[in-house]
Image (cartoon, rainbow, N blue to C red):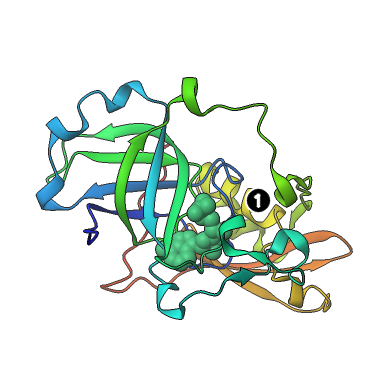
Amino acid sequence: MTLDPIATVRSCFGGKFGIPRQPGLCPSAWGTLTFHPAYRSPEAIRGIEGFSHLWLIFGFHETVAQGWKPTVRPPRLGGNQRIGVFASRSTFRPNGLGLSLVRLEGIETTAADGPILQLGGLDLLDGTPIYDVKPYLSYAEALPEASGGFAEVALSRLPVEVDPAAARAFEALPARARAVLQEALSLDPRPATQVADPTRIFGATLCGCNVRFSIRDGVCRICEIELASVNDDTLAPPRPLE
Ligand code: SAM
């Protein structure tokens, strides 16, 4: 059985670093899903507007070439305890497939390459190939009694501050982009192996900007924001839904 991508997601996450590790953790994140011509049909999505959330089955296209191993070291366990890859949501998997539950915020029908699905709360890199879209069935899939293994560890968030030097650029961003920066950075995206150096400056490409920040004494400080250079193959991310 071969898989043929049916669509491509454009998202506010221009690089892997800084993307939340699961959907919903950065609720303001946004993206669009554009079907490929062979699957682009208003008929094929008839009724989808009745669902608030969709499952996306996608490809970890940026890392799939790195292959997989039977065990992985989840960041949730500090990056030094190994567990089985099938007991994890690691990106390094035999077929490189991801599964994300995202919000359906709207459907753009007038564009030449429409219908385009407008999504929220996603954890996908800009340009991610999509292999299937399915509606979330809360009557069957909402399981409050489910147990979450090692992943049940409570998620902590950092306070995020903006240095005066970055304040003007930060305020110039659309409100939703400001929210994405704060939500995504509050999750502390640093790899467990890089948390020791409080002087280190990190960079992430978020909402079409190169955002530089440091994390010291439990506080994330945004120190510089500049518009990312946009060239032919890295188009600017879709505008956020207001
Ligand atoms: N919710 C999905 C799942 O459970 O299969 C993804 C979980 S995975 C831990 C989330 C991470 O995948 C993100 O933090 C980002 O670094 C990475 N990622 C997202 N899109 C990707 C892509 N197209 N290629 C490679 N890595 C990607």
Q: Is residue 164 left or right of residue 29?
A: right
* Residue situated furthest right in the rendering: 217
Residue 35 location (% of width, % of height): 21, 48
Q: Is residue 59 left or right of residue 180?
A: left
Position of residue 204 relative to residue 52, above or below, is: below
Pick the front one: 70 or 24: 70
Q: Determine the secondary structure under disc 1.
A: helix
Residue 14 visible in the current orientation: no
Residue 117 location (% of width, % of height): 30, 39
Quadrant in the rendering for residue 62: bottom left
Q: Amino acid at mark 1?
A: Gln
Residue 212 location (% of width, % of height): 64, 70
- What residue is drawn where x is 82% and y is 79%? 197
> Quarter of the image containing the C terminus?
top left
- What residue is drawn where x is 76% and y is 68%? 81
Q: How many marks?
A: 1
Residue 132 location (% of width, % of height): 30, 47
Check disc 1 and report the residue beneath it. Answer: 182
| Neighbours of disc 1 within 10 Å: few (<14), some (14-19), many (20+) | many
Residue 124 visible in the current orientation: yes
Quadrant in the rendering for residue 190: bottom right
- What residue is drawn where x is 61% and y is 45%? 25
> Quarter of the image containing the N terminus?
bottom left
User: Looking at mark 1, is its residue's CB closer than 8 Å to ligand 1?
Assistant: no
Q: Is residue 124 left or right of residue 19?
A: left
Position of residue 229 relative to residue 188, above or below, is: below
Q: Is residue 132 left or right of residue 25?
A: left
Quadrant in the rendering for residue 215: bottom right
